[in-house]
Amino acid sequence: MSSENSMPGESAQEAELQVEMKKTQVSQITHFAEDSREVPSSERTLDATPIIPNPQDQDKPQGPADTLPVTSTEPSPPGEIKIDSVGSNSVSLSWGSPAGMDEIPHSFKVTSSSSVKDNTLSITAPSNSTLISKLRPGIHYSFTVTTVLENGTQSTPVSAAVFTKPTPPGKIKIDSVGSDSVSLSWRSPPGLDEIPHSFKVTYLSSVEDNPLSITAPSNSTVLSNLIPGREYTFTVTTELENGIQSTPVSTCACTRTSEMPSEKSVPGERAQEAELQVEMKKTQVSQITHFAEDTREVPSTERTLDTTPIIPNPQDQDKPQGPADTSPATSTGQGIQSMPASRFLCTKPSPPGEIKIDSVGSNSVSLSWGSPAGMDEIPHSFKVTSSSSVKDNTLSITAPSNSTLISKLRPGIHYSFTVTTVLENGTQSTPVSAAVFTKPTPPGKIKIDSVGSDSVSLSWRSPPGLDEIPHSFKVTYLSSVEDNPLSITAPSNSTVLSDLIPGREYTFTVTTELVNGIQSTPVSTSVCTKTLQQDNDKLTQDYSLQVPKEPLVAHVEKSILLPCHLSPTISAEGLEVRWLKVGDDYPVHEYANGADLEGKQSPGYRGRTRLFKEELGTGNVSLQLSNVRVSDEGKYQCYVLSSEWFTESAVNLMVTGLGSSPRITLLGWQDSDVSLLCESEGWFPKPELHWRNVKDADLTGRAVLTEKQGTDGLFTLQSALQISQREADGIICLIRQGEEKRILQTRVHISGK
């Protein structure tokens, strides 16, 4: 209605009336009878009228508050951009949700740009994160994100900027090795020809803890002042002018030992030198071959070489055997020799075999590897190192055998694992490596938000530990009569699955899925879609189901018949019969294709229900329920379905439990007073307990009542009363239940002490 006109002569003030229409689904409104006079409890009624949702609105999403009049306004901007990870050709971004936009459909426009010509790219992101790929290494990129409505309206942008990492150098080449220096070179990193950069070279010996570093302006360097006979690890990274570094490349080498000068020959003697090549196989030795001491000149045909057998030193039996050492030794005519120039002193053990990833969890990885060659009799262990791009996330452990379990990892993270063979003296082999993503954590328990005849709405809690890791959810669903599951991808923690078959049981499975496709362990739930009760094309008017109009009353631990008959009478043998309890996810009983479908039955009803199959031919689809429980109370729907039509009706069931007769126990005496206890159990619904004396006076107000409801739903009552001996004689404890005033009572007589 329009507002009334203002009085003549007064200024007209216009006010815009904001009318907020909340989209709320209501299933039932309860109202009371208008007659408020006091009536007996047996006559007082509560009229509850169900409100049936409009079928046309069942699948429509609930939108935000609709405020009239509507004006075109900008959406809220996204939250602050966070740089999750940076590579040489990709950047992972995420941002906070725009304020007040939870119920408004929207997406995000992400734009990346740099100073490089023609290098601007825009994409649309459906959720709060994305991966920008195909970038150039070592370039400064700016990223802007705007919120975009379905009509194309954009918010003000939020921005962030970052340099992509440079590409790493090529494989390191050992050009030369001396006793105190090593010469290295490497190939140029790809894609950086026009970008100023240098190389950071880090080196560390096997017996030191603190690495040293230098900066190399080109693709090679010489590292000096090294210690002879040590194993060194060399690492090279590409470094931009702003200090950003690439991922490293590494190699190892042993410096040579110091070479000893040969001894001088004896003066005055003619020295004839002959180079003797002695190949020392992988043998543990304590003595070296020596020549005869006789230095006189003899004919070459008579010149002899005395070799003493080499006996292994028992103390060296367990030491690792090194590689063959081919070293030139010089002999003079007088038999004087120089010391051989050994090529390497620090021999490495053999590396482990290829690493095998045995199993991957969300916070652990199980590894195994092949035995190092030729190390069966040499004591050794293995050093296992795990690392990731996460800061301070490097861990090393020692494994005594060829396998280990790395735990306390983070979910959804890319981990690299290296394994080296380690001798007892600490010398390590070259490493072998493997890499894997840990699995993401699974979603929380699935919640069924709503169920329609052809749609189901699901939601679930966020998987723990993945707040900063881009992920989505894979939702798979399969009906009980199909073999091939269907799948969709949900960007957030909820989804609506449509085009389902009415009256079918569906199993829904949700897994967390990373950008690279790695999935978590699944979580699952099942539910039956509603029947076609709102589909007027299939809801038949030709047949109906005859059921009692009044509620049925069943007694605990007894049996009850839920009557249901087809009218007019037709055979139900070739039809589908289904009994459902309102509020339960699974059928109470289901019959199809001439057999009971026990596998689909609700666990709480297994072994307690049956149809009268011999009477299905006459249209009798009644259900017998045995061993009745308190939890059986409720509304039961009886459905009969064919391929072309269905019909349904409902039966209300009330459950009652008539408990035991009250028992009165004398607890004790105190002066002239007595303490009495009245007990009774097995009641439902909860009854009333009263004390009365011989004059029918109510003493209940003087008693202390304790009520307990067991896991079976039945009530136990205990009432303690302290009264004088005179009043106690002939006292009655009675239990009264329900509108029918079912009464059980016990009278006792108390004699003197």
Image (tube, grey):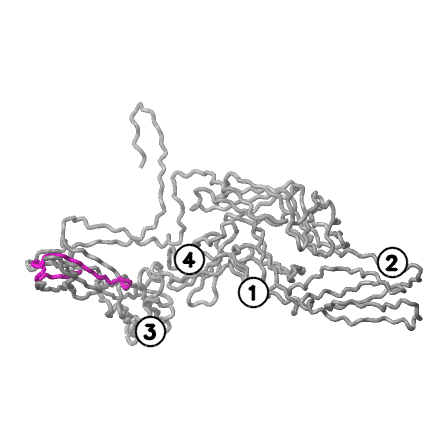
Which amino acid is tagged 4? Answer: Lys
Q: Secondary structure at mark 4?
A: loop
State the mark number for residue 573: 3
Q: Main secondary structure of the magenta part?
A: strand
Queried whether the magenta region covers residue 723, the answer comes back as yes
In depth, the one of 331 and 27 nearer the eye is: 331
Residue beneath label 1, please?
358
Do the numbered discs 1 and 4 sit on residues whose CB atoms are within 8 Å? no
Residue beneath label 4, please?
445
Which callout, 1 or 2, points to the residue nearer the camera? 2
Q: In the image, what residue occupies the spot 69% across and 69% down?
A: 314
Q: Which residues are magenta?
A: 710-737
In terms of sequence position, does the residue under pointer 1 or pointer 3 come before the other?
1
Q: Is residue 466 left or right of residue 178?
A: left
Q: Secondary structure at mark 3?
A: loop
State the mark number for residue 264: 2
